[in-house]
Amino acid sequence: MKAKTQVAKISTKGALVPALAPTAIPLKDRRLNFGGKWEYAPSPEDAKSYPIALRHELFINGKFVVPAAGTYFPSINPATEQQLTEIAEANAADVDAAVKAARRAYDRVWGKMPARERGKYLYRIARIIQEKARELAVLETIDGGKPIKESRDVDLPLVAAHFFYYAGWADKLKYAFPGKTPRPLGVAGQIIPWNFPLLMAAWKLAPALACGNTVVLKPAETTSITALRLAQIFQEAGLPEGVVNIVTGAGATGAAIVNHPDINKIAFTGSTEVGKLIARSMAGTGKHLTLELGGKAANIIFEDAPLDQAVEGVIAGIYFNQGHVCCAGSRLLVQEGVYARVVKKLRDRIQTLRVGNPLDKNTDIGAINSAGQLARIRELVQSGLDEGATLQQTQCALPARGFWYPPSFLTGVTHAHRVAQEEIFGPVLSVMTFRTPEEALERANNTPYGLSAGIWTDKGSKIFKMAAKLNAGVIWANCYNKFDPASPFGGYKESGFGREGGLPGLAAYCRLD
Amino acid sequence: MSTPRLEVKKTYKLFIGGKFPRSESGRYLPAHSVAGTHLDNYAHASRKDFRDAVVAARSAAGGWSRATAYLRGQILYRAAEMLQNRSGELVSEIARSTGAGPAKARREVSLAIDRLVHYAGWTDKFAQIFSSVNPVASPHFNFTMPEPTGVVVVLAPDEPALLALVSLIAPVILSGNTAVVIASETFPLPAATFAEILATSDLPGGVVNLLTGQRTELAPHLATHMDVNAIVDGTGIAELQTTLQGGSAVNLKRYTRRDLKAADWFADRAEDPYWILDTVEYKTAWHPMGV
């Protein structure tokens, strides 16, 4: 969909003169031309101020230790494919050492500490994160590929806010559970994904620690660097040894945590497939479990919606973080009367998105997190084309090295298509239509997932009716991808169970006697 | 031959709208230690000073109540940070005023800091505990949530001069109210020093205003001011309570008494989220559901 129009050019005298006869291009096909005509000067965030160590060890019992087997795996920058560092691979012995350290810290220090003092540690951690926010944002972007403007303006402020929010809960738990005496569960094993490495660590750690649990945390293998930087922050805050232990590695390390007999609770964020494996392997162990899994959210635009605002929300809903978002609004349901207008606006709007160096402050879409993920996105989009959908993409040059996928959307999608059923986890939107609110509900709920949904209409009563009938844990009305530590997050159905954030987020880490 | 250096004496002033004015009345009072030694002089607030303080509090109320709960929490925590940082100053102020030993004075200051941290955490949580979604028997989405009542007059008891003051102010301002505070009459200097510390935290000017002087002189004016929404009375003095509560009837101010003995301010009962509810209004909204 290359832009064909050039409405005006600037003459040597500086006055605007028509470049083409107005009749040359029908009015409905004219559009603003941004792409190739408007170059931005590079504006990269300084990365040199934040060197990355050549090797990262495990963080067990308050110290950085060499892994038992002495093995390491490389961690690369997905925007350049260059190796950043090597990360220790924890085996079952390392996990056991981490669990023992966590148990000791729970029995001797953290479980017994007055709640108020626990809270003050978390406040300290929140403040140090605020102080180091820029450094952490840059590292997050280098390690994971997300645009610096997102890591700087979304991820890091939320990370600090989560610690700050749950710090305040530590000494107020009796008010959260009237009539009950909340107690910690013990040692929590937490396994987090690569799409929001620090933010997911914060979502898991802050409530667990506030409630008095100790933790063994495993970051995703492609994004371990910032979790280990967080470990340094815990040291700086004087957090007692063993309260948080960080073991790095891939699936085997995660399995060792899940299967460890002295763990009381598993919290997992990741794919529904792995979530089901964990649920099965934990059956009968008596361990507590919360799961935050995949999604295939419907973003529903009604004819009475403010369309420009809705299109902005759709863009934010699917292209935020390259679409590596479990709650991404990946199915767009548009009421028929406005379908043509919405698609035209979308088509024009994605041309303005800038794909490239994630460290550049003007970048909207960064690098795809890994070669494997890129292959999966390509495979699913191809399936959409094979099944008869039409692809619209941003016409922009992609960098020669690294993993990239341009912002895309598919029209002519039916509900039977794989791109309407499976989570793509990339910057790809599937557009479908509906006629009545009932049909929108039927289609939106026609998925095994149930994490989130979006509603766009200027009619408030419609919002509440739809919100009540959508089977999803988070409903965004006339907005999308809004997050706050005070607001619970989590899914219905196969998107998992349990909530993170807000008051229900405490329940995941408390025993109520 | 050297002359011993002469110490510089300080005049403690009022704290109104983020500034430190003297009393418009030009009056001052001497502060003494319990042993009777003259310490320093402080401003003797008048009715006009009080009225100025209410104007400052009212002007600050809009911005403060619209600030996000998260920001209010950050600011109260910042105040705790500042208090920690300058705790030595407060300890010596309490010690020289009340004659308390350094350990006892330090205990009071530490508890005041921790209490501020505790209440900082309530800014974005009390609405989660004390709001409701109401299952009305019609197709309506109906919810109730607390909102700050507005400008609140807070009267501190004589002792403990700092801890009681902090314990009274924090639950009032955390919800978005602004306060005009009348300090301990016997020991006004720790309160005045606390105000100087607040002035260098991130609290916007006018959110907390502090007056020193004579309570009985100010009480009728506090009670009958038409632009004050509520009074939180921690004095425990019966005649004062009658004056304040009686006068409040003029515009139906919310009047709350906190009768705690000096030692009670150190106990858990002086740290109570239900105190937040004494200076909030419940608002219920109805919205139809349907397509």
Image (cartoon, rainbow, N blue to C red):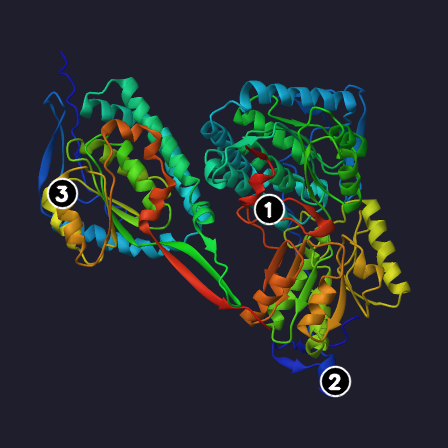
Q: Amino acid at mark 1?
A: Arg
Question: Label 2 is found on which chain of the structure?
Answer: A
Could you say where residue A273 lies in the image, as x and y percent from the top left? 80, 45
Chain holding disc 3: B
Q: Quadrant of the N terminus of chain A?
A: bottom right
Q: Quadrant of residue A183?
A: top right
Instruction: Using the image, determine if residue A124 lies above or below residue A93.
Output: below
The answer to whether A327 appears left or right of A510 in the picture is right
Secondary structure type for disc 3? helix
How far apart in space, not on screen, are marks 3 and 2 (Cα)? 82 Å
Give the label, 1 or 3, closer to the camera: 3
On the image, numbered disc 1 is attached to which residue? A152
- Residue placed at 14% from the left, 24% from the top? B33
Which numbered mark, 3 or 2, is in the foreground of this view? 3
State the image coordinates of residue B107 (x, y, percent, origin top left).
32, 23
Q: Residue A357: in sight, yes or no?
A: no
Front residue (pair B273, A209): B273
Q: Secondary structure at mark 1?
A: helix
* x, y percent for residue B169: 30, 41
C-alpha gap between disc 1 and disc 3: 54 Å
Which residue extends farthest top?
Answer: B1
